[in-house]
Image (cartoon, rainbow, N blue to C red):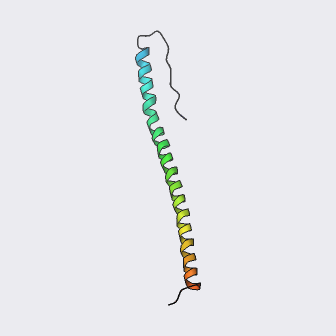
Amino acid sequence: MGISPLTITGVSSFSDDFQTILSRAVSIASIPVTSLQNEQVNVLSRKQLLTDLGTSVTALASAIEELGRLGANKALSA
């Protein structure tokens, strides 16, 4: 979703300069939008990484609990 460029056509000697000014203004106005879109991508990436980390921690906790059960039920004695 971007800002549509403005196009000026005409015979004025200033139309090219005016077009350049408008194009530059649109480019400058697009900077915050682009920045927010990049930040959104970064936030979604961090969210996915945290979800993956949570899944890994849950799996690790399950493995530790299972080791604890094995140790309690089938402990070796010397």
Residue for point 43% across, 28% down? 25
Horizontal side of residue 75 vs 18, given as left or right? right
Image position, residue 22 (x, y; %):
44, 24
Q: Is residue 30 above or below residue 43?
A: above
Image position, residue 26 (x, y; %):
46, 29
Residue for point 45% across, 41% down? 35
Task: Specify the farthest residue to the bottom.
Answer: 78
Image position, residue 45 (x, y; %):
50, 51
Horizontal side of residue 70 vs 30, given as left or right? right
Residue for point 56% across, 67% down? 59
Quarter of the figure that contains the N terminus? top right
Q: Is residue 48 above or below residue 25?
A: below
Residue for point 42% across, 32% down? 28
Q: Is residue 49 above or below residue 76?
A: above
Task: Specify the farthest residue to the front.
Answer: 78
Image position, residue 65 (x, y; %):
56, 76
Q: How many marks?
A: 0
Q: Nearer the viewer, residue 73 or 18?
A: 73
Q: Nearer the viewer, residue 16 or 44?
A: 44
Horizontal side of residue 33 vs 66, given as left or right? left
Task: Specify the farthest residue to the top.
Answer: 11
